[in-house]
Image: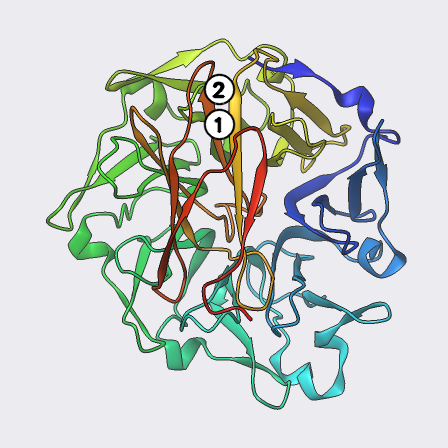
Amino acid sequence: MFTDHSQLIRSNPPGRHYGVGVTDVDGDGTFEIFVCGFGGPNRVLKWDGSAYIDIAPPELADAEREAIGVAACDIDGDGREEIYILNTDTFMGVKRFADRLFVRGERWIDLFALPHNREALNLTAGRSVVGIDRSGKGLYGLFVANYGGPMRLYELDEDGVLRDVAPQAGVSKVTGGRGLVALPLVSPRMDIFAGNEHGPNFLFRNNGDGTFTDIAAEAGIGDPFENVRGIAVLDTNGDGRFDLVYGNWEGPHRMFVQSSDGHWDDIAPPALAQPSRIRTVIAADFDNDGYEELFFNNIGEPNRLFVQRGADWVKVDMGDAQEPLGLGTGAAVGDFNGDGRLELLIAHGESGAQPLSLYQGPDNGHHWLRVLPLTQYGAPARGAMVTLETPSRTMRRVIDAGSGYLCQMEPVAHFGLGIKQTATRILIHWPDGSESTHPVPQIDTTLRIPHPKSG
C-alpha cells in the first residue's frame, strides 16, 4: 500500500517528536504540517514543489518547551486558524510550563503570555486538544483533555479575554484524559467523545444551548477498564451515522457502532481488536478506491492496516509504513503536494530519537474529489459533515477538529472515486446545524465551499 518518500523531507535529523497537526501556518491558502518537538524545536513542514522544508518561525519553533499535542481552529473570527500547543514537563498532574495559544498578527503571539490571560493558564498535564464550535457561531473554543486535573474549554469573551468556560458548559471533569474528537456524533451540533485512562470514557452530547451532558454510560461506550489512545471517526456500515474506532493501550481495540436506538456496540473483529502499544488511529482512503482504510500506529512494534472486505475488516500488508522498529508517537494525513493522493506523516520519539517518516499510497490512476467547507468568516469549518453522492453509493466524511490522541488531520473531506466513478452532488451539514447542497462541476479537484451565511 505505502511507499517511503521520507527523502522528500529536506532536513530530517533524528528527534523526539510527538503530536502532528495540519493547518495553514503561513496564510497562503495551502496547508502545512506542524510537528511537536519534545526537548527540541517544533517544526512546520511545507511543500515547496520539490521537497518539504521547515518554515517554522522562532515563536512557533519554541525550542525551550516540551510540546506533545496540537490543534488549530479560528477562535477570533478573523478567518485564520490559531494554534494551540500542549506543553508538558510531567505526564500527570501539575506542570511547570504552560500551554501556548498562538495567534497571528505582525508575528505569532502567545495569548496565554498576555497579562490579562494569565489567570487562564493551563498548568495541568494535558494529552489532547480539539476545536469545537459549541454554539454554531463560527467561533471555536479549544477543549483540552487534562490528566489529573479538570478538563478545560477555552474561548475568547467579548473583550478578547481567554476564559475557561468548561464549568458552565458541564465538561470540567477530572480524570486521566487522553484522546478527543468533536463532531455531530449524537446530535445535530458538535458533540465530544473523550477517551480516558484509568476511568470511563465521556460522551458529551451537545444540548444545543452551549452545555453538554455525558451519556457514555447509557450509550454503552464507557469502557471503564481500558486505556484509550488514538480515535478515528468513520461510517463503518454506511447507515449515515458516524462510528468510533479507538485503540486501547495494550488492551483490546474497539470498533463501536451506534444503532438507531442510541446504543453503541463493539463489533471489532479479532485481528483489529488484538492489543498493541497503540498511539494514533487514522481512517482515510489512501488508495482512492472510495473506501476508507484504518491505520494503527504503534510504538515499538509493527504498525497495522485494515481494509473493508464486504462486512469484514481485514488486516493487509501495508508495505513500507509497517515500521517494525518505529517508535511512533503521532501521525497525520493530508494531500500536501496537491496530486490528489494522501500522504501519511509519522512522528517518532518518547523512548528514543528517530527521523520523521513520510509515506504515500499507490499511484493507481484512481479519481478523487476534495471538499473544503469554510465558516462564515472564511476559516476551515472543522466539525462540518460532508456527504458525497455518486451513482452507486453515498460516502460521508467529517472535517477533522482534532484526531484522537495528540494530533489533528487536514480540514478537508477527501473522497476517492476509483477508476470510472463519478460524483453527482455534495451535501454539507455545518456546525450551526444549517445544511447546503452543491453540484459537482468536475472531479479530480478541490472545492472550497463558503458557508451559507457568509457575505
Q: Is residue 414 left or right of residue 13?
A: left
Residue found at x 77% / y 32%: 353
The quarter of the rendered structure image containing the N terminus is top right
Query: Circle 2: is it few (<14), some (14-19), or many (20+) Cα within 10 Å?
Result: many
Query: Which x, y percent locates residue 137?
Result: 46, 73
Q: Is residue 384 left or right of residue 160?
A: left
Pointers 1 and 2 in contact (C-beta within 8 Å): yes
Q: Height in image: 391 above or below 22?
A: above
Q: Height in image: 146 above or below 316?
A: below
- The amino acid on which the numbered mark 1 sits, given as a three-letter code, is Phe
Query: Which x, y percent locates residue 132?
Result: 47, 63
Residue 200 visible somewhere in the drawing? yes
Q: Which residue is mark 2?
A: 304
The quarter of the rendered structure image containing the C terminus is bottom right
Residue found at x 35% / y 75%: 170
Residue found at x 60% / y 25%: 341
Query: Which x, y percent locates residue 75?
Result: 59, 70
Q: Earlier in the sequence, mark 1 or mark 2?
A: 1
Secondary-structure class at tag 1: strand
Residue found at x 61% / y 71%: 122
Nearer-the-camera pick, 257 or 121: 257
- The amino acid on which the numbered mark 2 sits, given as a three-letter code, is Arg
Q: Height in image: 25 above or below 214?
A: above
Query: Which x, y percent locates residue 370?
Result: 53, 37
Residue 96 visible somewhere in the drawing? no
Nearer-the-camera pick, 265 or 38: 265
Nearer-the-camera pick, 446 or 314: 446
Q: Which residue is mark 1?
A: 296
Question: Alpha-carbon distance for marks 1 and 2?
Answer: 5 Å
